[in-house]
Amino acid sequence: MKTFWLDRDHHRYRDRVRAGQEAFADTLGDIAPVAFACVAWTLAIPPALDPGYVRWHRRVLSAGCDRNPFDGGLTARVELVSPLPAELTASRTWWRDRGWRGWPELFGQFVQPTDRDLSRNPHLRATLLVEAPLPLDGLPAAPEDPAGVEAAAELAVTVLVRDLDDLIGPVLQQLDTDRAVT
């Protein structure tokens, strides 16, 4: 099961990078690849590019990459749709016939409840927040000048997708396995 993958239309991403060259200005020539990779990631996902060049599993609500101020490393921050904790599903006495709802799904995608939904029923939607360091292995060095930004940004995003897929994939596989059992 793929958790993160790239859209086939990489030309659209390169066009977005070309249009957003100014976002890379402070990263050019940096000896650490982190700031450059973070900008490349930001331009590959909504809202900067919608639909995103980076695609993800339906349980992923958001995925970001940031420079860790402590050590300058790369930190992933991924928010996932989760089933309710076992403590809430072992007994439903707390429901008190209020018509509680979980995550609405539309065409197989988890979505936020509409204002109309919220006016009719209480909703309890569980999420998991994964914050984890990512390796720097394979990330390209920030180019010295703007001419190399497009290719380096595409490579950086490819490496981040691989690392995020490796990190988050087992978590999502377990969540989907648990959902199939219940």
Image (tube, helix red, strand yellow):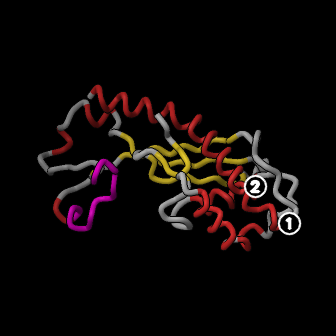
Residue depicted at x 27% and y 64% = 114
The picture places residue 69, in percent across and down from the top left corner, at 75, 54
Q: Name the residue under label 2.
A: 152
The picture places residue 30, in percent across and down from the top left corner, at 86, 58
- The answer to whether residue 88 is magenta is no
Instruction: Examine the rendered structure and indicate whether residue 145 appears above or below residue 98.
Output: below
Dot 2 or dot 1: first in sequence order is 1
Q: Residue 145 carries which label?
A: 1
The picture places residue 20, in percent across and down from the top left corner, at 67, 71
Q: What's the distance in space between the residues labelled 2 and 1, CA to CA?
A: 11 Å
The picture places residue 29, in percent across and down from the top left corner, at 87, 61
- Answer with the quarter of the image where residue 81 lies: top left
Residue depicted at x 51% and y 35% = 169
Check the picture and name the quadrant holding the C terminus: top left
Q: How many labels does the image show?
A: 2
How crowded pointer 1 is (Cα within 10 Å; few <14, some 14-19, many 20+) is rated as few
Q: Residue 78 carries which label?
A: none
Instruction: Examine the rendered structure and indicate whether residue 136 appears above or below residue 104.
Output: above
